[in-house]
Image (spheres, rainbow, N blue to C red):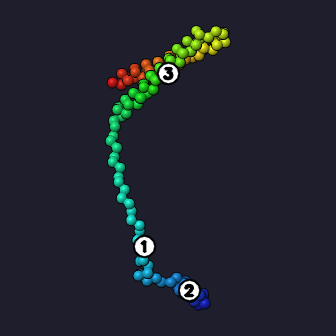
């Protein structure tokens, strides 16, 4: 047992000797950090009420719907003119079909516009 205790003590001593002690002066060497650039903080954004955000969004959507109605109405008129001007039956059938499709799309956008307008007046 005495031999085992002696080996433990020597093992501890070797470990202690293996790690060199550093003085306080050498451990506290510091490197100067590079100078930081001044960063401007962004100003906080103003809070917009929920009703104003919804009003802005509906105005934007109504404007898009009106643009689409105008676009498809003009396309429908052009197809109608081409239908009446075409001579062959194939072109007449094609332009009639395109006129009907554009008319249905215009009606769909009109229904959506009507719904948006009704919702806008019901919220007030």
**Image position, residue 105 (x, y; %):** 53, 19
* Residue for badge 2: 14
Near-viewer residue (28 or 95): 95
Q: Which comes sooner in the sequence, label 3 or label 2?
A: 2
**Image position, residue 29 (x, y; %):** 42, 77
* Residue for badge 1: 31
Report the residue at 36% width, 25% height from top.
123
Dot 3 and dot 1 residues touching (CB under 8 Å): no
**Image position, residue 80 (x, y; %):** 55, 12
Would you identify the image quadrant in which residue 66 lies? top left
Mark nearest the camera among 2 and 1 is 1
Q: Is residue 70 above or below residue 20?
A: above
Mark carried by residue 71: 3
Near-viewer residue (57 or 39): 39
Q: Is residue 119 above or below residue 90?
A: below
Q: Is residue 87 above or below residue 112?
A: above
Q: Secondary structure at mark 1?
A: loop
Report the residue at 52% width, 14% height from top.
77
**Image position, residue 61 (x, y; %):** 43, 27
Dot 3 and dot 2 residues touching (CB under 8 Å): no
How many marks overall?
3
* Mark 1, other Cα within 10 Å: few <14 / some 14–19 / many ≥20: few
Near-viewer residue (81 or 72): 81
Mark nearest the camera among 3 and 2 is 3
């Amino acid at each position: 047992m005495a031999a085992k205790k002696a080996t433990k003590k020597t093992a501890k001593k070797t470990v202690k000797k293996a790690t060199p002690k550093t003085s306080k002066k050498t451990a506290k060497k510091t490197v100067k950090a590079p100078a930081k650039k001044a960063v401007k903080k962004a100003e906080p954004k103003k809070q917009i009420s929920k009703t104003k955000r919804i009003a802005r969004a509906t105005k934007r959507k109504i404007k898009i719907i009106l643009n689409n109605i105008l676009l498809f109405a003009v396309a429908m008129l052009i197809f109608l003119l081409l239908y009446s001007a075409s001579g062959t039956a194939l072109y007449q059938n094609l332009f009639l079909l395109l006129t009907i499709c554009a008319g249905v799309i215009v009606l769909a956008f009109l229904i959506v516009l009507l719904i948006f307008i009704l919702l806008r007046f019901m919220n007030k």
